[in-house]
Amino acid sequence: MKSTILGMFGVAILWSSGAAADPFVACTDAANYGYNTVAYFLRASYKKANCDSNLASEYEQFLTDILPMYLANMAKQTTDEKSACMLQGSYESWLDTVQDEYADCQGIAASFQAIQRRLVGTVAGSLFESFYGVVVPTFYTPAIVAQDFAYPYASLPLVGTTAQCEAEIRGAVSGVSQELVTALVVAACQ
C-alpha cells in the first residue's frame, strides 16, 4: 500500500514538474508543431467541406477564429523566440495547406481557382493578434514580423486587392503599434 501511494506521489511530482517545462527543445520543434497542427485541422476541414466553397468559407472563418488562440495558448509555455518560430510555422502551413486544398478542388468547383487576398489578411491578422499577446510586449519588431510572415506569395493564385488584405489585418489586430501593423501589412499583403 505504501509503495503504491509513494509511486502515485512520485508520478504526480514528475507530472507537475513536466507540465511547467518548455515543450519545445528548439525553434524547429516549435515551428514544426505550428506547421503540423495547422495542416491537420485545415486538411480535416477542407475534407469535410468536400469542395463546397460555402462550407469551405465557413470552416476557414471558424478556424481563423479558434486555431490561432489554441496555438498562442501553447506558445505561452515556451520562450518568446520559440513562440515566434511557432507563429512562422503556423502561417507557412496555413498558406501551404490552403494552396494544396484549393488545387485539389480546382477541377471540381470554379470557386477554388484562386485564393482571396482577404483570406491571407484574415489569417495573418488572426495569428499575429493571438501570438502578440503571449510574448513580452517589446519582443516583436518589424524585422521579426517580416521574418515570421515571409512567404513565396508569387506561388499563390491570389485574387483581390492588397487593400482587402490590409483591411482584414487592421480589423483583426488591436493594441499593436502602427509600426508593427504596417510591417505585417507589408509582409502579408504583397
Image: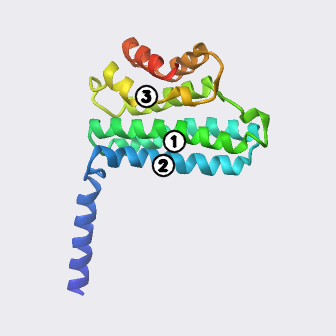
**x 40%, y 36%: residue:** 87
Q: Residue 178, image x and y in percent?
A: 40, 12
Earlier in the chain: of badge 1 and badge 2, it is 2
Q: Please rate how many residues cluster around mark 2, counting C-alpha atoms within 10 Å: few if below 14, some from 14 to 19, many from 20.
A: some
Position of 9 relative to 122 (above/below):
below
Residue at the spot of label 1: 67
Where does the N terminus fall, quadrant-wise? Answer: bottom left
Q: Residue 48, image x and y in percent?
A: 69, 51
Residue at the spot of label 2: 37
Q: Mark 2: which secondary structure?
A: helix
| Colour option used | rainbow
**For this view, does 131 lie left or right of residue 25?**
right
**x 69%, y 38%: residue:** 58
**Pointers 1 and 2 in contact (CB under 8 A)?**
yes
**x 77%, y 42%: residue:** 107
Q: Which label is found at residue 25?
A: none
Of residues 116 and 19, which is closer to you in this image? 116
The answer for how far apart the CA atoms under marks 3 and 2 are is: 17 Å
The answer for how far apart the CA atoms under marks 1 and 2 are is: 9 Å
